[in-house]
Amino acid sequence: GAVVSQHPSWVICKSGTSVKIECRSLDFQATTMFWYRQFPKQSLMLMATSNEGSKATYEQGVEKDKFLINHASLTLSTLTVTSAHPEDSSFYICSAGDRRSRYSGANVLTFGAGSRLTVL
Amino acid sequence: DAKTTQPNSMESNEEEPVHLPCNHSTISGTDYIHWYRQLPSQGPEYVIHGLTSNVNNRMASLAIAEDRKSSTLILHRATLRDAAVYYCILNAGNNRKLIWGLGTSLAVNP
């Protein structure tokens, strides 16, 4: 089945530094990937939709200059948290849809394992 | 996107069936009913989806009401590894954005 690999699984950084999170579709091509953020005891909040070869579409309230998304190939999307601050500490999750999948008509998504960011 | 309503939490015993309900009274004709689950500190995992007919797969069964305003995810024999938050989500076929609620936190007792 479809597999999405997310790296790193956890990262600790100092305030003011930038952190890059990678999301790879291992056995399928993903024209669209989604980035979510999840705070403790809360649900997933969609941050942005990443489209291969074009600019990402950000949800309302998400700073596109702070959360840089790049989707340069059909198998890789990256999220860079620039000038991270403690309030950016969260669980970041990516997902992708498999356009070859027989489920594609229903838009079934495969998720990465998530990346836990802690900003000191 | 149409909204879903789920109980905040449920409890089950190991080896027993579990029925997780979901209400979606404003569902539209093109909305698929998706179920995902999220284990602690992990990304969500696809469980099952359906449109009108009941569905079965190796993980679970999905029973959809005739009027499609509600559905039930059925775990036939709960195991400790099934303890997770279960999300019921509606998604139209041409829109890949999934809107997540708080889901149902399932506890499984040994």
Image (spheres, coloured by chain):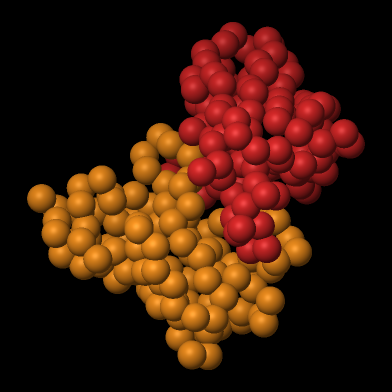
Snapshot quadrant of residue B94:
bottom right
Residue found 87% across the figure and 34% down from its top: A53
Q: Is residue A32 left or right of residue B69?
A: right
Q: Give the x, y percent position of residue A29.
A: 70, 38
In this orientation, does residue B24 appear? yes
Residue at the left extreme of this rendering: B110
Q: Is residue B80 above or below residue A75?
A: below
The C terminus of chain A, quarter of image: top right
Q: Nearer the viewer, residue A23 or B85?
A: A23
Snapshot quadrant of residue A56:
top right
Q: Give the x, y percent position of residue B69.
A: 52, 84
Q: Give the colour in which the image draws chain B.
A: orange
Residue found 60% across the figure and 59% down from its top: A103
In this orientation, does residue B99 appear? no
Q: Is residue A4 left or right of residue B47?
A: right
Q: Give the colour in which the image draws chain A.
A: red
Q: Give the x, y percent position of residue A40.
A: 45, 39
Q: Nearer the viewer, residue A25 or A116?
A: A25
